[in-house]
Amino acid sequence: MAKAAATKAPAAKAPAAKGEAKAAAPAVVSLKQLAASLAESHEMPKKQAETLVNDFVQSLADHLKEGAKIRINGLGILEVKSRPARTGRNPATGEQIQIAASKKIAFRPAKELKEAV
């Protein structure tokens, strides 16, 4: 009966050898795959769903070019932020360089998205 009471801990995995594959990376989902998923769930042709998704992305880009802030409930906020010119250093030589002013697209996730992930 002592055998039944004793439990073995699962054996620890040995580190992967050079030739062995590592754990699979998370999948990347393309716009085409998103459109196919929407087409299936809304019973519409894939071509029509692809057109809708592409038009949506183009509309987002157009509004961002105009400087608009885009709020998508449940997803987050997209906005263009200006980065002023600044002095930096070349990491290879240590020489000071001037970095030009630029714009970047900032994304702030919504509370619902943060909680879901």
Image (cartoon, rainbow, N blue to C red):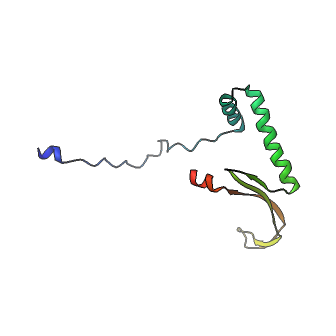
Question: Residue lying farthest right?
Answer: 66
Q: Is residue 113 left or right of residue 57?
A: left
Q: Is residue 90 left or right of residue 15?
A: right
- The quarter in which the N terminus is drawn is top left
What residue is shown at x 76% (from left), y 72% (from top)?
A: 88
Q: Quadrant of residue 104?
A: bottom right
What residue is shown at x 17% (from left), y 47% (from top)?
A: 5
Q: Quadrant of residue 96?
A: bottom right
What residue is shown at x 49% (from left), y 41% (from top)?
A: 21
Query: Residue 117: x, y in percent?
Result: 57, 51
Q: Is residue 49 visible?
A: yes
Q: Is residue 83 above or below residue 65?
A: below
Q: Is residue 4 above or below residue 110?
A: above
Query: Residue 8: x, y in percent?
Result: 24, 47
Query: Residue 53: x, y in percent?
Result: 76, 37
> Across the whole image, how many numbered discs are drawn on residues?
0
